[in-house]
Image (cartoon, grey):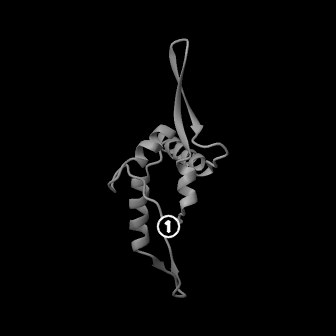
Amino acid sequence: MKDAVYARLRLTEPGPGAIHFPRRLDADYFRQLTAERVVTRFERGRPIRSWQPKRDGERNEGLDTFVYAHAALHGLISMGLRLNEEVEGVGIRAAAPARDAKGVIRSAWMK
């Protein structure tokens, strides 16, 4: 999963596959997000890849939580969650709220 995240971080143009970050994130978050690198060592002639910190004591919580969230999303998708369909459905329901007798607007979203 870290390979997939790093591949998406390398994309320079916005659009499908690119990761879009909110402006509120600071430099420390991006240091954490890029705190590791792949190290390949050979054991009995076979390559073994592992992710290692770039610097000793470097915090990597930003990367770990991003990877966990990415893996959780793919798990949900593999179980049938279709986010695009969910978003389209929310947009339709939110566009036509119903009014009750007291004039309170009730959202159909929770129904």
| Closer to us: 104 or 68 | 68
- Residue 106 appears in the figure: yes
| Residue plotted at (52% across, 39% down) | 37
Label 1, residues with CA under 10 Å away: few <14, some 14-19, many ≥20: some
Instruction: Give the quarter of the image for residue 56.
Output: top right
Single out the residue that lies furthest toward the top: 44
In-front residue for pair 65/78? 65
Number of marks in picture:
1
Q: Residue at the front extreme?
A: 55
Helix, strand or loop under label 1: loop
| Residue at 41% from the left image edge and 42% from the top image edge | 7
Q: Residue at x 42, y 60 (%)?
A: 87
Image x and y of residue 52, in percent = 59, 36
Q: Which residue is mark 1?
A: 109
Relative horizontal placement of residue 92, taking residue 64 as reference (left or right): left
Q: Position of residue 80 (x, y in %)?
A: 47, 43
Q: Residue furthest bottom?
A: 102
Rendered view: 74 above or below 95: above
Locate residue 2, reporting x and y percent.
51, 40
Vertical relation: 65 (above or below) 2: below
Q: Residue at x 47, y 47 (%)?
A: 81
- Residue farthest toward the right in the current orientation of the protein: 57
Query: Is residue 1 visible to us here?
Result: no
Hey, what amino acid is under mark 1? Answer: Trp
Q: Position of residue 89 (x, y in %)?
A: 41, 61
Question: Is residue 75 positioned above or below 59 on the image?
Answer: above
